[in-house]
Amino acid sequence: MTRNRVAGIGFQHPLRNARPLTKRKLAFAHLLMTAVLVICIIVAVTAVAIGSARADTLAAIITADEGVLPLAILLGLLFAGFGAMTAAFTRRH
């Protein structure tokens, strides 16, 4: 009996004889993962927004003598950088 338990340990794919994976179970798993990902993104955005509000970052930038131009340049460069990274990683070989 112990020999069978030890033989099952390792890098082999687990046997799924008892509960085969169906399309319905797979769709439920994808739906659950998507919902959890959305919740995590909402929590992260909320934490960043609260941190930014407490630091008064935008108010300090807007009330400065330079105006809104530095903020617009920063956001433009940020979006351009994200677009360049997306284009670089989705290129087909």
Image (cartoon, rainbow, N blue to C red):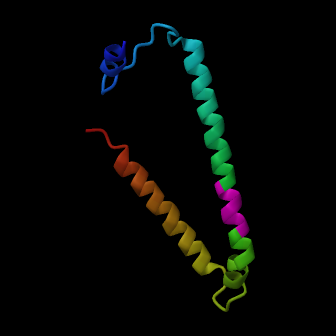
Which x, y percent locates residue 35? 66, 36
Q: Residue at x 64, y 39 (%)?
A: 36
Q: Residue at x 35, y 17 (%)?
A: 2
In the rendered image, residue 90 lying in the magenta stretch gets the answer no
Q: Residue at x 55, y 19 (%)?
A: 26
| Residue range of the region highlighted in magenta in the rendering | 44-50
**Figure check: 89 above or below 32:** below
| Residue at the extreme left | 93
In the rendered image, residue 47 lying in the magenta stretch gets the answer yes
**Figure check: 61 above or below 51:** below
Which x, y percent locates residue 6? 33, 21
Residue 1 lies left or right of residue 67; in this view the side is: left
Which x, y percent locates residue 92? 30, 39
Of the pair 46 and 60, the residue shown nearer to us: 46
| Residue at the extreme bottom | 65
Residue 41 lies left or right of residue 5; in this view the side is: right
Q: Image quadrant for the C terminus?
A: top left
